[in-house]
């Protein structure tokens, strides 16, 4: 009926228009023009109807299917907060918190969220301008977005930027720690781990450690402070010196110029002379000279060996023979061992140290002569006694 009425309307309009110029309705020209306009109009209306159907289908999908049945497999921009509540993000930054069980949109216009650590239940979120917190259990706002900057909850506390100063709040939004610390842009931290938080000086150059009562348990004089995964030990750095403390901040290893790595049951220390030491977790020295690996050193002999090299052989006939020469290789008397930071030293085959790990790379020149390079590329020649040959 729609296309019939459209056809008749077009015919009448075209008939009246071309009648003004004396064109007859039954003429070939008029029929051709009428057919062309009717077909074009039908195509345009069909495309318009399809566009409307696509928009309607997308709207129905967004309102019903994606909101009610969407899961991680189909919703690339979704992030589950718990079993029933998820955050659906959008490209325009106007995401929302949705309760899949009740079908209710709980919070609208969310730019991003940051889930808490451990057993904390408040999720930090931004509305594009300010930051606040909502419950990951109910999806309802607990602390309205009113902070310029805010961090995740951990150990029951969260840090917020309140008018340019860092303060720590509890789950109700009450300020429990206020040390008048200014907010430092791009500074990491402000999060409690194992009951302590690393805090920085106003210029961000040094740091210390604060407990959950706001007490400074380690002064703000260190370059870095890092706990182990179980928070039983702390590794401190102050300039070129490092130390290890236990959970009660008693020294296991005092501040010493070295590099420290805390492993599984041992403390590995690389000294300034690149030697490696190993201590147990009580600070008792296990061994003061560890190495990473040992490699053989080979050199080229002065003699030359010649041999024929067949280039091509077709039907048992040699088409070309080239003469090849090379220096045979031999093994040097000493070995190269690798110690801390990749530095190398010389040792005998039975394991006796000849030189300290002073060199970045060692190669043999003769049976008992070695070319040793520093890290900047300078080289010296060392004999089998470890003495530099001048």
Image (cartoon, helix red, strand yellow):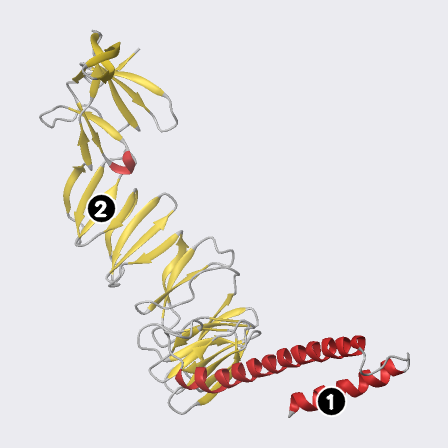
- Towards the viewer: 205 or 270: 270
Q: In which quarter of the image is the N terminus?
A: bottom right
Which of the 4 image quadrants contains residue 301?
top left
- Towards the viewer: 268 or 104: 104
Helix, strand or loop for disc 2: strand
Q: In which quarter of the image is the C terminus?
A: top left
Q: How crowded is mark 1: few (under 14 residues within 10 Å), some or many (20 or more)?
A: few
Residue 61: give x, y in percent of width and height: 48, 83
For label 2, the residue is 268
- Furthest residue to the right? 21
Residue 174: give x, y in percent of width and height: 45, 82
Q: Closer to the observer: label 2 or label 1?
A: 1
Q: Is residue 240 above or below residue 316?
A: below
Q: In this view, does 376 lie above or below 42?
A: above
- Towards the viewer: 164 or 118: 118
**Residue 155 placement, left or right of 92:** left
**Residue 279 placement, left or right of 210:** left
Q: Which residue is pictured at 23% across the width and 27% down the height?
A: 345
Helix, strand or loop for disc 1: helix
**Residue 56 placement, left or right of 169:** right
Residue 125: give x, y in percent of width and height: 48, 76
Residue 319 tag number = none
Answer whether residue 359 is visible to the viewer in this image: no
**Residue 350 placement, left or right of 119:** left
Q: Counting residues from the N terminus, which is met first, the one under dot 2 or under dot 1?
A: 1
For label 1, the residue is 8
- Furthest residue to the left? 350
Q: Which residue is pictured at 32% across the width and 70% down the height?
A: 195
Using the numbered discs, state the Cα–Cα distance from disc 2 to disc 1 in whole angstroms: 93 Å
Residue 7: give x, y in percent of width and height: 71, 86
Which of the 4 image quadrants contains residue 379?
top left
């Amino acid at each position: 009926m729609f296309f019939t009425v459209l056809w008749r309307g077009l015919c009448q309009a075209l008939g009246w228009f071309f009648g003004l110029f004396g064109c007859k309705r039954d003429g070939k020209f008029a029929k051709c023009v009428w057919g062309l306009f009717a077909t074009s109009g039908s195509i345009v209306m069909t495309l318009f109807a399809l566009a409307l159907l696509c928009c309607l289908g997308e709207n129905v999908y967004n309102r019903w299917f994606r909101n009610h049945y969407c899961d991680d497999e189909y919703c690339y921009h979704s992030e589950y907060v718990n079993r029933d509540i998820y955050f659906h993000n959008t490209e325009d930054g106007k995401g929302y918190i949705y309760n899949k069980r009740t079908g209710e949109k709980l919070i609208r216009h969310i730019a991003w969220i940051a889930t808490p650590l451990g057993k904390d239940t408040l999720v930090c979120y931004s509305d594009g301008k300010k930051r606040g917190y909502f419950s990951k259990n109910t999806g309802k706002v607990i602390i309205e977005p009113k902070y310029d900057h805010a961090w995740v909850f951990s150990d029951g506390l969260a840090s917020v930027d309140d008018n340019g100063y860092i303060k720590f709040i509890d789950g109700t939004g009450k300020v429990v720690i206020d040390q008048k610390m200014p907010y430092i842009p791009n500074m990491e931290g402000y999060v409690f781990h194992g009951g302590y938080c690393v805090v920085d000086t106003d210029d961000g150059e040094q740091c210390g450690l604060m407990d959950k009562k706001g007490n400074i348990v380690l002064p703000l004089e260190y370059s870095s402070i890092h706990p182990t995964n179980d928070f039983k030990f702390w590794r401190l750095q102050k300039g070129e010196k490092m130390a290890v403390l236990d959970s009660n901040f008693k020294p296991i290893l005092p501040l010493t110029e070295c590099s420290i790595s805390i492993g599984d049951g041992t403390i590995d220390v690389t000294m300034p002379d690149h030697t490696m030491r190993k201590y147990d977790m009580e600070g008792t020295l296990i061994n003061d000279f560890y190495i990473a690996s040992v490699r053989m050193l080979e050199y080229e002999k002065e003699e030359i060996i010649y041999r024929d090299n067949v280039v091509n052989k077709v039907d048992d006939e040699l088409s070309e023979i080239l003469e090849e020469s090379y220096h045979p290789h031999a093994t040097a008397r000493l070995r190269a061992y690798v110690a801390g930071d990749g530095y190398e030293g010389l040792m005998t085959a039975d394991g006796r140290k000849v030189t300290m790990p002073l060199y970045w790379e060692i190669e043999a020149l003769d049976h008992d002569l070695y070319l040793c390079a520093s890290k900047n590329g300078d080289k010296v020649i060392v004999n089998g006694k470890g003495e530099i040959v001048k």
